[in-house]
Amino acid sequence: MLTLTNVTKVFKKNEKNFIAVEDLSFTINKGEIFGLIGTNGAGKTTTMRMIATTLKPTYGTINVCGYDSVKDDANVRKCIGVLYGGDTGLYDRLTARENIEYFGRLNGLNDDAINKQMDYLSNVFGLQDYLDRKCGGFSRGMKQKTSFARAIIHNPQVMLFDEPTSGLDILASEEVLNFIKQCKKMGKTILLSSHNMQEVEELCDRALIIDHGKTLCTGTLDQILKQTNSNSIKESFIKLIKKDY
Ligand SMILES: Nc1ncnc2c1ncn2[C@@H]1O[C@H](COP(=O)(O)OP(=O)(O)OP(=O)(O)O)[C@@H](O)[C@H]1O
Ligand SMILES: [Mg+2]
């Protein structure tokens, strides 16, 4: 469903080449949650942006639902929903409903489909009370839930969640985690980046640990624990980064 093959991204920084992602390969199947774990600047968001077709890989290929991310970028975008943590990019002067609806239209949904998805998603995220209020006055959590609904209004097969619970309180995080689990049950293909190792342990089937753009370890969570002789993914992560295992 989602396959990266030897993907490398080189940026120009002060006239010099900087390798943000190096020779990255992985496949995520239907109904699978795959974790991308790394320190700040490891290359997680760059990877998500390449899959989302916002950036082109310098080398390597990305295949999403049978489409190539460079040659068939428009079809790729139809198959994916992307949620970046941090800045949500909602239009403050529009209501939550208008923001979500706007994305639905961009994705070619008709009124019926939008209304159906709006009902379903506002139920899942408890948006009903503020669906018709302007986003400008929303709390961090309200904005994040609205962004979630907006990212997946077109019911995409592949979902990219870049630190989806960053800045959310415990209850809001829990709702988001439950929703991601529900997406898995629905057979979605999910790439998740997170700095919260408890979250990774709770959600991910497999994971990849990345540092300075390079893959340090990948496999099922059990395989990662065994390979690093660890009792938790947090311990594995620290040992891998410090090369101490
Ligand atoms: N457009 C760009 N031009 C130049 N360098 C960039 C660009 N985008 C990202 N980088 C660099 O690529 C590296 C990887 O950044 P990226 O945002 O992918 O990291 P990340 O793993 O998402 O980190 P974080 O956990 O902080 O979100 C960083 O060194 C960053 O400065
Ligand atoms: Mg990032």
Image (cartoon, helix red, strand yellow):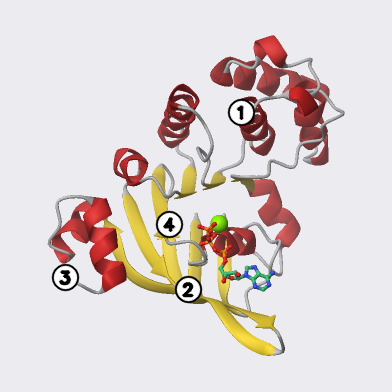
Mark pair 3, 4: CA separation: 20 Å
Using the rendered image of the protein, determine whether residue 217 is visible from the camera's viewpoint: yes
Mark sitting earlier along the chain (4/2): 4
State the SS at label 4: strand
**Residue drawn at (82%, 31%), measured in percent from left and top?**
92
Mark sitting earlier along the chain (1/4): 4
State the SS at label 3: loop
Quadrant position of residue 214: bottom left
* Residue 97 pos. (x, y %): 77, 22
Mark sitting earlier along the chain (1/3): 1
Mark pair 1, 2: CA separation: 30 Å
Q: Which mark is residue 186?
A: none
Front residue of 36 and 27: 36
Q: Which residue is mark 3?
A: 245
**2 vs 3, front mark:** 3
Q: Measured along the vertical axis of the image, is residue 134 above or below residue 221?
A: above
State the SS at label 2: loop
Mark 2: C-beta under 8 Å from nearest atom of ligand 1: yes
